[in-house]
Amino acid sequence: MRKFLIGDILTRVKDVVLIEDDKQYKRVTIRLYHQGVNLRDIEKGENIGTKRQYLVKPGQFIMSRIDARNGAFGIIPEELNDAIITNDFLTFKVNSEVVNIEYFNLLSKTKDFLSYCINGSTGTTNRKRLKEDLFLNFEIELPSKEEQDSIIHKYNNISTKHRLLSENFREQKILLERLRTSYKIDAINGKYTKKGESHESSIGLLEEIKKEKNRLIESGTIKKEKPLLPIEISEQEYDLPEGWTYARLGDLLNPINGKAFKPSDWSEEGLPIIRIQNLNNPDAPFNRCNFSVDSKYHVKKGDLLIGWSGTPGTSFGAFIWDREDALLNQHIFKGVIYGDLVDKYFMQYAINSKLNEMISKAHGGVGLKHITKGKFMNLVIPLPPLKQQLEVVRMIKKAEYMFEQLEQNLIKSEGLGNLLLNSLLSLEQKR
């Protein structure tokens, strides 16, 4: 190993260009933490304020003066030939007589190199900038060119295998998620229920639920809604097991929409207000309210909540609330099931099996979409007898545990692959 000053390896390049208003220019951005040098945009000269800039060439090493200490540096790729940069960036020609450019690129991603950038940056906390002279005078050790070439050859072989392995991990994760979703849908629709297993019928169950609904209407507990349409043959997607039937959600539960809390209602203390982002993100912060609110907006642990507003893949769907007592904000239904003849977990899985249908029925712009109460109430789900509802829930929860274990094993294997790649590189550099 021989010692070199970084200034023996890197030579500053200043290829000045004066910006012309009628020309188009590619501009550069450097992502933090060694994430690459990329095209920022293509802009017309008349819209570029700083008229004196610098051209960059493929193979040059580029650094951000401000964010070099955060890993904002890398090699200029071919597609950025003749792109422009301001004086906030430094570009260097790499001395190919002493270092292989690929080896230097790997070397720049090490902790030691990052420490040179951190120690070479001076100023107050928010105004630290890389000092070129200070940075170029740090010492660095390099193996011979032949050893560098050998390390790069080994690294590229390992990297290729690692890339293929990573692609395989990604494909397995996608397939695992598809299998997880498919299993739940099939279980909800009775695919794994044994023939002749039940001697009960959910027809009678549905009648009992309707009686309870009518009792609540007569007592004034809930309002009478517009009658739901009969279920058409075209809405019955599966051949259900004997004793099962189809039902509309509006036949099984009463959806209570949340209150439209305003910022003026928020306080430092009081009950948390559940917004759509709190449904599937445990880290999302809560607003709170400390004044008296109608009891219908109160949520207790174990309540069934349905997000009817959100973005695809985020807050649409059903959730069982598992935290402290809270208040319900708008865009969320509290699903109050009629009687005790439908299991809330079965209802949760059944609603979530209809996510694609919910999203397809939603209206709104590119961002937030909504499904109307009427469309929600008319969603069609399978209804087995209570005993089989509980059995389906048991199967899904058992499968969920198995899928979770498989996913964790994939994540662990992928992490070990990344660790192995970095360890091999480190060992080769120290030889």
Image (cartoon, rainbow, N blue to C red):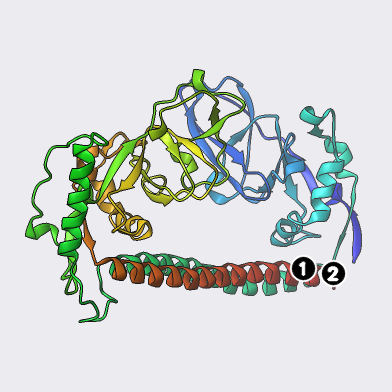
Q: Taking 428 as reference, is 76 above or below it?
A: above
Q: What residue type is labelled 2?
A: Lys
Q: Which residue is drawn at 69% across and 43% down?
A: 72
x%, y% of residue 362?
26, 41
Image quadrant occupied by the N terminus: bottom right
Q: Residue at x 54, y 47 (%)?
A: 323
Q: Which amino acid does label 1 sit on?
A: Gln
Q: Residue at x 80, y 72 (%)?
A: 427
Q: Which mark is residue 406?
A: none
Q: Splitting the image into 4 quarters, where does residue 38 fall?
A: top right
Residue holding disc 2? 430
Q: Taking 3 as reference, is 200 above or below it?
A: below
Q: Which of 226 and 351 is in front in this view?
A: 226
Q: Nearer the viewer, residue 180 or 264?
A: 264
First in sequence, mark 2 or 1: give its number.
1
Q: Mark 2: which secondary structure?
A: helix
Check whether the beta carbons of the residues at disc 2 and disc 1 lie within 8 A of each other. no
Residue holding disc 1? 148
Residue 409 shows in this picture: yes
Q: Taking 59 as reference, is 196 above or below it?
A: below
x%, y% of residue 22?
45, 23
Q: Which residue is drawn at 20% across and 82% down?
A: 196
Query: Whole-Å distance between the Cαs marked 2 and 1?
Result: 11 Å
Q: Which of 11 and 135 is in front in this view?
A: 135
Disc 2: CA contacts within 10 A as few (<14), some (14-19) or many (>=20): few
Q: Taking 195 as reference, is 37 above or below it?
A: above
